[in-house]
């Protein structure tokens, strides 16, 4: 993977509300299983305040506004009271500990990353099984691998993680990032690789950043230090690019770029492999624009300022590499499925571009470079295939993959003769392959040794009609020999946003659900990237209702085709997928028995007022626009809960250190749901501590999923069977 693609992934993972949930659990139906009811629960009495806002003449009450202050003593007390109710409920489920024990056993196998190289060194990550954080290893030549960085030694509870790692071109230094308790804030440090000595360099308040080496230092992006006590909730503005020279104090870092006139823009600096070009990429999501502006400066010409290559923000551009004095870029300009072009930075006008790879019917889902080859990953009905091209666009071959599934990797440098990639699918644990560029052949390098038989399960893909007739793909995974009698406990998972594709992927924890007879369904909704930019745009802004219609249609298809029934069906999603679950459970509460909205965006009128939420306007729109306000208000989960309605059994999950989708979204939604829900189903919120936008450690991941499964088994009337 090139450093530019890494920057692109950083943007996806940190600016968007990312699809990160790993759906997992277990089950056998038992109609006589008793279920706890909401009637037996006493929810905290949540105070209300007299707060009303006026949106274009529409008065909107916000009585739980005070819960937005996640640092106040009142909010802390409310969190404590809610967790007491939730964990009191969970602790009474008799098989809760058995579930956790089983998940630990399934998860306890060695997990490796694909190796990556720099000069004489090879690096890889390994987790022995239940380590809270994966360990980074270094190997020099054919010597035995040694531990380079073990994040598990950084904290007693394992919630401090290694968040970034980049090696300088000469392999003398490595820069790396540290994140605490799941926060998006990072601290950067520098290591001398030969001596393994940690240098005195300490860079703070790094967020939404790459780490791009050039010469004796590297570029990075940061904010000014937030006011004390506001680290998790401050509105992130004025993103700046700095250059840090190794061995100097942060206060002396060179300010490379800032834009005081546009405080809600993101700025990244990347460097071509030969260190000739510095690439400045700018994103302007705060004004609702989805594209990228690109500026460059040429070290060969000793340029001191950046010159424009792409000045508008209407289309996406990702610089892949340079070929001499030309830049190679992927773009969706006039190509919703993306294409590859060559741009002369001295003559950047589009009429001077050379098209290397034209748009195809299959969208590009990944680009990597190594050995002066382009490795292009295409998406075909939500599965991958990979073609290899030279830099002129000449196709050399297709890389044979072992099955239908998901591939990643292939990145390297121009002198590489070998690259590594990974492959996975729903019942295919991650396998690492080595690809020889000369022989054009792949060899299995390493595979996971897991304690289950993949042949016990099967995966199928179906295409079902949505409300408007659009065909939506959906994967369904279950044990072989499943009876289609409508009695199978089923988890329906979705995301539908930010051009993020839900590809087939393996989850060890999911096996605990499948081995008990459960069904897992994953719907590939509009708003994602499965079929290119048109598919994405069909689920954004005024079209967002399409996403919810697609998800509702998936549930109805599963019921019609006898996979499950209302009493056995749960819906789940995280982040933007949490919004999905919240919207659908308020629109069709009678359609599902259970709902699992995780770290969701629940207040669609105020999401842009917290941390980097303003950057989601390209997908959601804004309540500051009259037409977009109407659309947002029509589906905003918080604002569409109706008094006296019986809602599905609900377990909301969030975390106290989520500084991407702040917990206030879930807090306010939980308070309103408990107030207005009048059915017999429990409606609870589980608030994790020292975690962020996803579990901060292996232990916390397993604990949370065990609680999610225990909740599901209880409300779906299931007794898991363990030996």
Image (cartoon, helix red, strand yellow):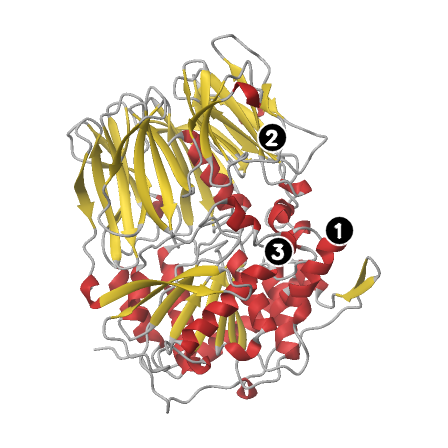
- State the residue at coordinates (67%, 63%): 67
Q: Tell me which numbered mark, 3 or 2, is placed earlier along the sequence.
A: 2
- State the residue at coordinates (41%, 89%): 34
Is disc 1 surrounded by few (<14), some (14 to 19) or many (20+) residues within 10 Å? few
Give the image quarter of residue 350.
Answer: top right
Quadrant of the snapshot with the N terminus = top left
- State the residue at coordinates (33%, 19%): 170
Is disc 2 surrounded by few (<14), some (14 to 19) or many (20+) residues within 10 Å? many
Q: Position of residue 414 (x, y in %)?
A: 31, 22
Q: Position of residue 644 (x, y in %)?
A: 66, 83
Read off the residue under disc 2: 240
Are dots 3 and 2 in contact, CB under 8 Å? no
Residue at far bottom of view: 32
Foreground residue among 413 and 317: 317
Q: Which of the numbered marks, if any, corresponds to residue 543? A: 3
Read off the residue under disc 1: 624
Circle 1 or circle 2, nearest the eye? 1
Residue 67 appears anywhere in the view: yes
Classify 171 as above or below 382: above
């Amino acid at each position: 993977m090139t450093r530019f693609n890494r920057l692109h992934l950083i943007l996806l993972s940190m600016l968007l509300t990312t699809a990160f949930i790993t759906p997992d659990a277990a089950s056998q139906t038992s109609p006589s299983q008793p279920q706890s009811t909401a009637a037996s629960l006493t929810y905290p009495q949540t105070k209300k305040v007299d707060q009303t806002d006026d949106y274009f003449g529409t008065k909107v009450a916000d009585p739980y506004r005070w819960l937005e202050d996640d640092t106040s003593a009142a909010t802390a007390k409310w969190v404590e009271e809610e967790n007491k109710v939730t964990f009191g409920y969970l602790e009474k489920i008799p098989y809760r500990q058995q579930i956790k024990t089983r998940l630990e056993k399934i998860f306890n196998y060695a997990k490796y990353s694909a190796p990556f190289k720099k000069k004489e060194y090879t690096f890889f990550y390994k987790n022995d099984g239940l380590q809270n954080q994966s360990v980074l290893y270094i190997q020099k030549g054919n010597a035995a691998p040694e531990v380079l960085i073990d994040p598990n030694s950084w904290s007693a509870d394992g919630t401090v993680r290694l968040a970034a790692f980049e090696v300088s071109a000469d392999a003398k230094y490595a820069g790396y990032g540290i994140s605490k308790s799941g926060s998006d804030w990072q601290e950067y440090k520098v290591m001398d690789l030969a001596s393994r000595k940690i240098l005195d360099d300490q860079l703070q308040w790094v967020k939404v950043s790459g780490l791009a080496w050039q010469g004796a230092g590297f570029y990075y992006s940061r904010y000014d230090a937030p006011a004390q006590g506001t680290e998790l909730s401050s509105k992130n503005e004025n993103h700046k690019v700095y250059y840090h020279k190794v061995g100097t104090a942060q206060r002396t870092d060179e300010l490379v770029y800032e834009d005081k006139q546009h405080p809600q823009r993101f700025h990244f600096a990347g460097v071509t492999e030969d260190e000739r070009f510095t690439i400045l990429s700018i994103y302007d999501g705060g004004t609702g624009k989805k594209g990228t502006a690109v500026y460059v400066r040429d070290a060969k010409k000793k340029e001191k300022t950046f010159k424009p290559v792409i000045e508008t923000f209407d289309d996406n551009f990702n610089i892949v590499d340079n070929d001499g004095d030309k830049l190679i870029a992927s773009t969706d300009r006039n190509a919703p499925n993306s294409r590859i072009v060559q741009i002369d930075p001295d003559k950047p006008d589009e009429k001077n571009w050379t098209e290397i790879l034209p748009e195809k019917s299959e969208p590009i889902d990944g680009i990597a470079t190594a050995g002066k080859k382009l490795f292009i990953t295409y998406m075909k009905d939500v599965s991958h295939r990979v073609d290899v091209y030279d830099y002129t666009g000449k196709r050399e071959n297709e890389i044979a993959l072992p099955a239908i599934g998901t591939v990643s990797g292939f990145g390297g440098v121009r002198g590489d003769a070998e690259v590594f990639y990974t492959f996975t699918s729903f019942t295919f644990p991650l396998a690492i392959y080595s690809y020889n560029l000369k022989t054009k052949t792949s060899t299995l390098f390493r595979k996971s040794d897991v304690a289950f038989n993949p042949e016990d399960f099967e995966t199928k893909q179906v295409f079902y009609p949505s409300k408007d007739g659009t065909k939506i793909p959906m994967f369904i995974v279950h044990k072989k020999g499943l009876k289609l009698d409508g009695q199978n406990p089923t988890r329906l998972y979705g995301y539908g946003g930010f051009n993020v594709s839900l590809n087939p992927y393996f989850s060890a924890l999911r096996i605990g659900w499948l081995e008990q007879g459960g069904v897992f369904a994953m719907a590939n909704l509009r708003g994602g990237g499965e079929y290119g930019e048109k598919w994405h745009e069909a689920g954004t802004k005024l079209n967002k209702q399409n996403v919810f219609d697609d998800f509702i249609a998936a549930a109805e298809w599963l019921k019609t085709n006898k996979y499950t029934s209302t009493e056995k069906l749960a819906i789940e999603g995280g982040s933007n997928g949490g919004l999905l679950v919240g919207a659908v459970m308020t629109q069709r509460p009678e359609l599902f028995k259970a709902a699992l909205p995780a770290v969701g965006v629940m207040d669609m009128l105020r999401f842009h007022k917290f941390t980097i939420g303003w950057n989601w306007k390209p997908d959601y729109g804004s309540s500051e626009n009259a037409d977009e306000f109407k659309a947002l208000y029509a589906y905003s989960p918080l604002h569409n809960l109706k008094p006296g309605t019986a809602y599905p059994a609900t377990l909301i999950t969030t975390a106290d250190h989520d500084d991407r989708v702040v917990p206030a979204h879930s807090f306010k939604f939980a308070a309103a749901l408990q107030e207005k829900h009048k059915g017999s189903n429990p409606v609870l919120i589980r608030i994790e501590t020292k975690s962020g936008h996803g579990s901060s450690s292996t232990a916390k991941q397993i604990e949370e999923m065990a609680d999610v499964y225990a909740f599901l088994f209880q409300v779906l009337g299931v007794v898991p069977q363990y030996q």
